Amino acid sequence: MDTHLRYEPEEYHLREILPSDISLQDLHQVNQDSRTYNYTNSLSMSQEDFRRLKILYNGTYRTVDQYVGEIYDYLVKTNQFEDTLFVVLGDHGEHLGEYGMM
């Protein structure tokens, strides 16, 4: 489970948070290649592009949250949770337009 680029959340999670002025197709057309944007300067991104990227990011977090919940529920249901070390880690955040970076 990963919340790094390329964001590929479950569609039903996107539908829960999708603003009425953006379509799913619009979301999936946004650039998700941070190397092209951050390092080559060969691509520009608008505030609207970053808005779409944030929606994909939030949808991905909802997807990961669901999967972690399913693992937890399975461990509890099968009486394995008490004998399991359940660790969730994060390594860093994403810029998503802050400081002009992806």
Image: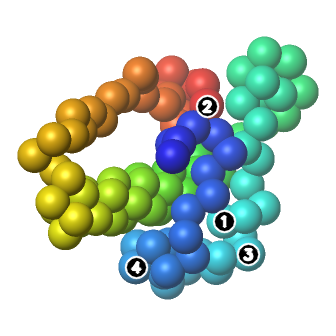
**Discs 3, 1 touching: Cβ within 8 Å:** yes
Amino acid on which the number 4 mark rests in the picture:
Glu
Question: Residue 68: x percent and y percent?
Answer: 33, 54
Labels 3 & 4 near each other (Cβ < 8 A) = no
The structure residue drawn at horizontal position 72% and vertical position 21%, both measured from the top left corner, is 38
Labelled disc at residue 93: none
The mark that comes first in sequence, 2 or 3, is 3
Categorize mark 4 by other alpha carbons within 10 Å: few (<14), some (14-19), many (20+): few
Q: What amino acid type should be assigned to the residue bearing mark 3? A: Gln
Quarter containing the C terminus: top right
CA–CA distance between discs 3 and 4? Answer: 15 Å
Q: Is residue 1 visible?
A: yes
Residue with the mark numbered 2: 102
Q: Which residue is mark 4?
A: 16
Give the residue at x 16% y 41%.
83
Q: Horizontal placement of 35 versus 4: left or right?
A: right
Q: Which mark is residue 27?
A: 1
Query: Gap in Å between the C-alphas at discs 1 and 4?
Result: 14 Å
